Structures are given as C-alpha cells and as structure tokens.
Amino acid sequence: MVYVWTGLVKAIGIKYYACPGIEIPPDTPFQYLEPPDDQAHMRPDEYDELISDPTGYLYNVWLPRVTTEVRARGETTAYRNNLSFVRGSMAMLSYFHAFGDQIARLRQESGTPSALSGILKAPFDIIADKLRGYRGLCMDMFRQPQKVLAACEALTPHLLHIAASGADPQRNLPVGLWMHRGCVPFLSPDQFAKFYWPTLRQIIEGLWARGIQTLFYAEGEWNANLKYIAELPEGSIVYHIDRGDPFEVHRALVGKFCISGGVPNDLLAFGRPDDVKEYVKKLIETIGRDGGYIVDASAIMQDDTRVENVRAMTEAARLYGEY
Amino acid sequence: MPNTEPSDQPVESRQPIAPGVCLPWEIVSREWPKIEGDAELVRRVWEDLDSMAYTYIWQCLLSF
C-alpha cells in the first residue's frame, strides 16, 4: 500500500486494516475492517471524554484500542509498548519524507504534477470511520444527538489545524478532503444538514480564509447535497465527481468551482479504449466547454484499471482539451 | 501532589487544549526548575516538538 502505508500500520499493529500480501492477497487493495458494534473503537458513553480533550482521548483510549502494541491506561507497559512509539513516529517520518522524492520522480518520469497536499476529513466521517463506527453513530444520532453535535464541534478546530499544517505553503495545491458517510444513502438530507455539513463547511471556509483550496473528493453519490455545496465561497473547492451525474453537477456548480473526475472506474477497468475516448470527449465538450474541468477517474484507480484505457483517457484529454 | 497531564485529569476539571498542543508549556514548565537561560528558546523548542506528537496522533487518525 502506498497510502495507508503498511510499514506504519504494522509498526504499531493497527488492527483495522487488512494489508495486501499479509492478511489478503497481494493484488487486492487494502481493506478497512469495521469492528462489531459492541467492540467499536469508541464506546457510546465516551463522548464527554472525547469532547473535553480530543487529543488526550486519542492517545489514552483510542490508540491502545486500535493497535496491538500500545497498552491502555492502567495496563502494565513493557518493551513492545515503548518500542511502538519509536517505531511508529520513525515510520511516519519516513513516510512523509519519501513524498518529496516520489513527487519529483512523478514529474520527471511521467510529467505528472502533484494534485494535492495535506489531508482533511469531515468531523462526522472521523466519528463514523474511526471512532463509533457507522452503525453506532447512526444509533447515536437518535439516542444522543447533542453529544454527536458537540463531538463534531470539538473535532473541528483540530481537523482544521491538521489540514492547514499540511497544506502547500505556496497555495498552488488543494488540501485533499475524502468524503465518506455523508452521501446518499448513508444520511438523509435532514441528517446531512444537521450533523454533517455545518462543521465541515466551517473547516472549508476556515481553510479558504487562509488561502487554502479544498479538493472536495465526493466519494459516492453526492448530487442530493449540491445545493449546500453551492453555498461555499466561489473558488474555495475543486469538486471531484465520483458516482454523481457529472452533467447535473455541472449545472449546479458551473462558474463557481472547478470540477474534476467523472470518468467511471468501471469504464477504465472493463471498457475499450475507444469507449474511454468517446466518454472523455463528451465530458470535455459539456462540463468542460467553458474551462474549469480536470479530466480524472471518478475514484482512485485500482489494479483492475487497464493501462490502455488510462492511455486513452490521457490522449483524449490532450486531443479535445484545448481551448 | 504530583503534576498530572491534562488528559489524565477528570473530564470536568480539564481545560480545553488548543489544536497543535499535547502537553502545554504552561503546565510542563511548572515542573521544571526556574530557567536561567533563554526561556523563550526553551519554550519554542518544547512547543515545536510537542506539536510533532500532536501531528503523530492526528495523522494516525486521519491518514492511517
């Protein structure tokens, strides 16, 4: 794995990933293992502790629970616990230091520039993905909604801080925002408006106030929420299309934000090069006709993507993408 | 009474800790002898390294 690097995952024994070549076949993308409800990484009665000190909660409660090596409060610490912090922090340094060389190689060997710098996730997604689990959080939205809202608010300044601290100092690249559990059908429109959107909007606007654009990587089907997204400040995001109808996205956001993506991954995996070229041409002639469109796959391309189809996508962009 | 880290205190007695901080300088500096040298330099180095500990746990949460 390049992102979610196995080196760090195994250095501290993160339990929620199945790694290619170790737990799953080497040609399989990594898998996230969401625990059963009663073994969620955060228990339903722990909201107050998270809200009062998110960083302390992560170190004291979350990290021991999600790793094999880190011991919890009150447990006997030993060699492997102590080693894990040295190994983990060294692994993280190695991981981030490697980016510079790899970015240079991409540019030199294939002429591909960087697409983003830094990372952001919505507060709600953090709670759903890494803390309560999606099912647990769904229960909490009904049983203790004020705690969920307070937790989203408590996480907000920290997620803004981390996103800003990893942003491109030159402000040429957007921060990557990976969207998970806010799309259809995970949340109803009312739940999206109440729980998901207010704190995420606050972070995106906070970044924009610092001159930092967000790559709004709308994984899944987000068109039901376009009316909210359209309220963001002009130019503050690049809107990346995954499964939403690209033409509907264009109608809702035209002239306000740059749009990227929209080339279906199944087309890139199972289609023919001529089909790919034709589809890219159609995208460029419609959503890209006035500029402001970046040709890209809908989602991250996996091993099933055919090289000849990537080549066809690139050639079509060069052929039809001139104004 | 020993000094304790903020996150080891009962929930209701904790003060909010700013983003970028794990163990605030205001707390740890009380545990040290009076600094005779450049206190500002010592504070800055402490906070720089503390921010790396902060980055570590939040990047574990976000990126891994």
Image (cartoon, helix red, strand yellow):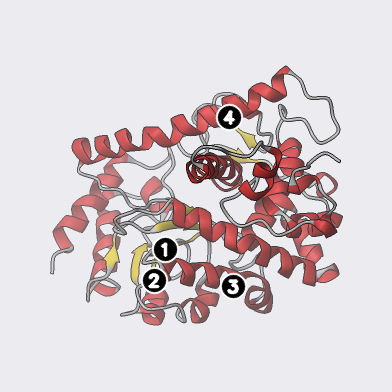
Give the residue type that dot 4 points to. Answer: Gly
Q: Earlier in the sequence, mark 3 or mark 2?
A: 3
Which chain letter matches label 3?
A: A
Give the residue type that dot 2 points to. Answer: Ser
Residue A285: image location, x then y, percent: 23, 71
**Residue occupied by mark 1:** A214
Q: Secondary structure at mark 1?
A: strand
- The answer for how far apart the CA atoms under marks 2 and 1 are is 6 Å
The vertical placement of A168 against A157, above or below, is: above
The vertical placement of B24 against A237, above or below, is: above
**Residue occupied by mark 4:** A88
Which chain letter matches label 1?
A: A
| Quadrant in which residue A207 is drawn | bottom left
Image mark for residue A197: 3
**Image-based side of A131 in relation to A206, left or right:** right
Q: Earlier in the sequence, mark 2 or mark 1?
A: 1
The residue depicted at 32 percent of the width and 37 percent of the height is: A100
Q: Nearer the viewer, residue A53 or A267?
A: A53
Give the residue type that dot 3 points to. Answer: Trp
The vertical placement of A45 against A291, above or below, is: above
Residue A69: image location, x then y, percent: 71, 26
Q: Crowding near pointer 3: few (<14 within 10 Å), some, many (20+)?
A: some
Residue A138: image location, x then y, percent: 76, 63
- Nearer the observer, disc 3 or disc 4? 4
Q: Are marks 2 and 4 in contact (CB under 8 Å)?
A: no
**Residue occupied by mark 2:** A236
The residue depicted at 22 percent of the width and 76 percent of the height is: A290
